[in-house]
Image (cartoon, coloured by chain):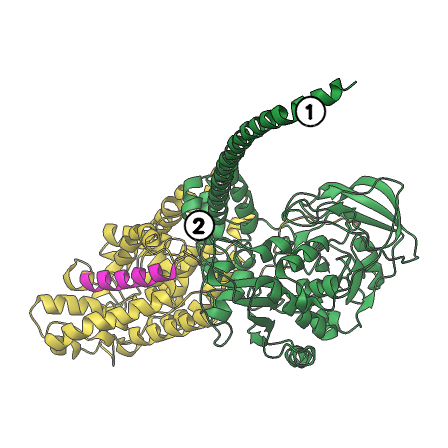
Chain colours: A yellow, B green
């Protein structure tokens, strides 16, 4: 009898890293489909590009570091990074945006820090922060949602636009692009216009932005499924959403002319995506349950502050990166009381 | 006084596991046919071996002590059968995995000649200290698996408060194991009477038997037995939810009382003692039947066992004989485990003998256990934090242990880890966390960093030694003073004596002299 001698526990494991990552990808599917519906097939091409670059950089770096390829390419973590990055950039952004983004995300933020599990910062957000700082123009060219657009570009046109920068004949950026609701709010408030007045623009929907609000709902559906599957814990999303409501509601009540309401905040920009998919990244987040609550509260407050006072329309990426820095300290300060102590 | 089991509490973390108890409870509880040879490790408890009493070639009777305890830390072993001592041999044992230990090899003679027994069904009239002596002489050690010398537990810490409640642990929380359930179903009155005996030894008023809520009729069986034995007033059966590891001593106490055993303390600090139901039943056999601990119920189970069952096995029987009695193995076996799948010991051989703490032999096929998989880096997912019943931070402990940051592992309370295996079980990166903690605990001990309990035990020990020395010193001084006094008195007396003698000599002398001189 040849017996394997290994320490307890002896039961088969109940989850794998690749399984966790795959479930995150499944959970993003509804949001991605919503994105395609409202903004056309651009997002699919951006996902393909970002994932392609992510896996290429991951492979190169693993080889350079002398690490085995199979377990680390097969863990799907680079795929998740690519998809999350792609979901944050405009659907017609030029192809090299993904290249630069993934260079920062995979090579610098992830592999140079030691690869999976060792990165201090959320790789997708590092990539996004890099490109939004470096290429603000390309990152602001969003399409108008389907309901407001004379006609979304088709797959071939989108591909051409992304790869060559050439827009379909007879159209130009001014015709097809549109400020995002958050941009419109930021600019409008800066011009001393009332929020109610700004919101009367057709780009706004029932809660947030036209189209955006539905994509946010679809992200939430995926996020709730992850909660149900226990892939993520409730702490971070709950802390983010509750804090946004708790902070923005009094401000909105006190100054409805200059402060958007809580639903407006939640259903525009990347807040729901961040609450369920980005701020819940375990590696760069907190691991104590109390710490996760604080992490979420911090992300929410910083996001609102950047949206209100900062130079960028949305602040989720920077808020997450700032809280990534605080995570180790928060973990240390929120150690649970051990049994019997 | 702490209320026990009137209201139930929840401990943090834990896992709901598939329990797989039914498999081994289908077949009736039978006695293993006596093997020709028994291999009896000299140490079958936590502590040093007792003093050996037999020599090679000697014939022994069933129940005859083979070793003798010189202190509460030692536990004697007895001959499970009559026969001949072949000698001592190095033989594979379960702990540490892959090691060998000194075993007495006994050739059984199938005659079942008992040594003279002293049954004491009148135990209610025996003094607690004498009961403890009898249990010690009967070789009792914790049968739940930890094999702590029961006499030491019963004697307790004389500095801590008295014990008001005895908790009998019948909540067998590990999957697959069913020996305690089998015992409670088959011999409920032995469990109850044993509990009453242990409570008397401890001076406890109340007995709470903690069983799992999924054990079906076991609770009623025990309650009926309590009424029959006459312990219904003292005994209460409490059904606790099956969430692994609720049968851990500290977790069970938390579930039953809501209180936590201090990290550097013992259940006794809460007025509690916690013993396994099988230990209670054996205590009863030792006292009431005069039958020392020479056999126990072992569960032989697992997906690779043909007919899983519980079996009464003599100590020293090799596991291969138990497996054969359960119909043998079916299909390939990847791992053989002594104990349960969550915290059991991996076995290197099926020749390993049954000892006092052997509750279960678990045979797992290739698909029932973890194959060697590449270990991934920790992704800080926090699942381990969620399931840790001691509220530790397993992933931070792991990172600190891996970087040999001993101060950090101590600061993260490594010694409060009960090695239940929950963290490693849920880890998506398949990091053998418990192995890391065991290794690090060893390194800390080497560096003289002890856990709180050991620290406090040492402090107590030193205080006790100091006090005993002081008392001895005082006694010595008193004795010296008394001796001095006696000597002085004696001296005084001897002076008086001498004077008297002189006087007598003077008065008697002349007569003698006269007499002597009488012609």
On the picture, is B425 further left or further right than A143? Answer: right
Q: Chain of mark 1?
A: B
Q: Which residues are magenta?
A: A288-305
* Quarter assignment of residue B516: top right
Quarter-of-image position of residue B169: bottom right
Badge 2: residue crowd in 10 Å (few <14, some 14–19, many ≥20): many
Disc number placed over residue B413 in the picture, else none: 2
Write down the residue under mark 1.
B511
Residue A319 magenta-highlighted: no
Magenta-drawn stretch, dominant element (helix, strand or loop): helix
Circle 1 Cα neighbour tier, 10 Å, few/some/many (<14 / 14–19 / ≥20): few
Q: Quadrant of the N terminus of chain B?
A: bottom left
Query: What's the residue at 14%, 77% (across, down)?
Result: A253
State whether residue A94 appears in this view: yes
Q: Residue at x 36, y 58 (%)?
A: A85
Secondary structure category for the residue under label 1: helix
| Chain letter of disc 2 in the image | B
x and y percent of residue A96 in the render?
Answer: 34, 51
């Amino acid at each position: 009898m040849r017996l394997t001698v290994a320490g307890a526990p002896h039961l088969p494991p109940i989850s794998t890293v690749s399984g966790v990552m795959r479930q995150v990808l499944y959970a993003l599917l509804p949001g991605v489909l919503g994105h395609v519906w409202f903004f056309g097939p651009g997002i699919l091409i951006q996902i393909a590009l970002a994932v392609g670059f992510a896996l290429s950089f991951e492979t190169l770096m693993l080889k350079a570091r002398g690490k085995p390829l199979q377990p680390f390419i097969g863990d799907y973590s680079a795929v998740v990074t690519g998809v999350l990055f792609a979901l944050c950039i405009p659907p017609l952004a030029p192809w090299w945006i993904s290249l630069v983004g993934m260079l920062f995300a995979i090579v610098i933020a992830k592999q140079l820090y030691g690869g999976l599990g060792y990165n201090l910062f959320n790789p997708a957000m590092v990539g996004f922060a890099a490109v939004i700082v470096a290429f603000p123009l390309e990152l602001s060219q969003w399409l108008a949602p389907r309901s407001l657009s004379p006609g979304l570009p088709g797959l071939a046109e989108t591909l051409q636009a992304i790869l060559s920068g050439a827009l379909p004949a007879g159209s130009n950026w001014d015709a097809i692009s549109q400020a995002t609701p958050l941009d419109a709010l930021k600019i409008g408030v800066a011009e001393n216009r009332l929020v109610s007045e700004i919101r009367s623009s057709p780009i706004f929907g029932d809660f947030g932005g036209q189209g955006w609000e539905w994509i946010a709902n679809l992200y939430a559906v995926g996020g709730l499924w992850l909660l149900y599957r226990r892939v993520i814990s409730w702490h971070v999303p709950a802390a983010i959403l509750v804090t946004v409501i708790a902070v923005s509601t009094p401000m909105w009540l006190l100054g409805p002319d200059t402060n958007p309401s809580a639903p407006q905040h939640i259903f525009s920009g990347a807040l729901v995506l961040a609450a369920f998919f980005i701020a819940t990244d375990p590696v760069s987040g907190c691991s104590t349950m109390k710490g996760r609550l604080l992490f979420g509260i911090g992300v929410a407050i910083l996001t609102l502050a950047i949206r209100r006072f900062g130079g960028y329309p949305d602040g989720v990426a920077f808020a997450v990166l700032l809280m990534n820095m605080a995570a180790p300290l928060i973990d240390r300060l929120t150690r649970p009381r051990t049994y019997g102590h | 006084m702490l209320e026990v089991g009137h209201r139930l509490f929840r401990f943090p973390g834990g896992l709901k596991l598939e329990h797989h108890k039914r498999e081994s409870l289908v077949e009736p509880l039978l006695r293993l046919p006596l093997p020709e040879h028994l291999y009896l490790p000299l140490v079958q408890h936590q502590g040093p071996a007792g003093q050996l009493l037999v020599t090679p070639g000697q014939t022994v009777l069933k129940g005859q002590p083979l070793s003798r305890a010189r202190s509460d830390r030692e536990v004697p072993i007895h001959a499970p059968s009559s026969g001949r001592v072949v000698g001592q041999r190095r033989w594979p044992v379960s702990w540490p995995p892959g090691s060998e230990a000194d075993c007495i090899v006994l050739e059984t003679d199938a005659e079942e000649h008992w040594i003279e027994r002293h049954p004491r069904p009148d135990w209610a009239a025996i003094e607690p200290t004498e009961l403890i002596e009898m249990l010690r002489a009967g070789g009792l050690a914790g049968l739940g698996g930890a094999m702590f010398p029961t006499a030491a537990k019963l004697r307790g810490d004389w500095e801590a408060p008295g014990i008001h409640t005895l908790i009998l642990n019948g909540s067998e929380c590990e999957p697959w194991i069913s020996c305690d359930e089998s015992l409670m179903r088959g011999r409920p009155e032995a469990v109850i009477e044993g509990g009453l005996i242990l409570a008397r030894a401890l001076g406890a008023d109340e007995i709470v038997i903690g069983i799992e809520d999924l054990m079906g009729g076991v609770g009623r069986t025990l309650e009926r037995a309590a009424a029959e034995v006459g312990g219904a007033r003292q005994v209460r059966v409490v059904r606790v939810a099956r969430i692994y590891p609720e049968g851990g001593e500290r977790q069970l106490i938390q579930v039953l009382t809501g209180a936590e055993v201090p990290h550097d303390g013992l259940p006794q600090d809460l007025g509690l003692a916690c013993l396994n139901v099988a230990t209670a039943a054996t205590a009863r056999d030792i006292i009431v039947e005069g039958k020392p601990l020479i056999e126990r119920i072992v569960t032989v189970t697992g997906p690779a066992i043909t007919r899983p069952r519980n079996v009464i096995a003599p100590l020293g029987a090799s596991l291969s004989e138990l497996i054969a009695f359960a119909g043998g193995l079916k299909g390939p076996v990847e791992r053989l485990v002594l104990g349960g799948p969550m915290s059991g010991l991996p076995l290197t051989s099926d020749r390993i003998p049954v000892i006092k703490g052997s509750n279960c032999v678990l045979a797992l096929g290739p698909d029932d256990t973890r194959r060697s998989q590449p270990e991934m880096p920790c992704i800080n997912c926090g699942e381990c934090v969620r399931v840790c019943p001691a509220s530790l931070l397993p992933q931070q402990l792991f990172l600190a242990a891996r970087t040999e940051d001993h101060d950090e592992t101590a600061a993260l309370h490594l010694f409060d880890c009960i090695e239940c295996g929950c963290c490693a079980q849920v880890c998506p990166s398949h990091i053998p966390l418990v192995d890391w903690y065991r290794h690090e605990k060893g390194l800390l001990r080497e560096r003289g960093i002890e856990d709180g309990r050991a620290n406090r035990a040492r402090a107590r020990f030193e205080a006790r030694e100091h006090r005993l020395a002081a008392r001895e010193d005082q006694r010595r001084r008193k004795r010296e003073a008394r001796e001095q006094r006696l000597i002085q008195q004696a001296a005084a007396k001897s002076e008086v004596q001498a004077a008297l003698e002189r006087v007598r000599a003077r008065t008697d002398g002349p007569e003698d002299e006269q007499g002597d001189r009488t012609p």
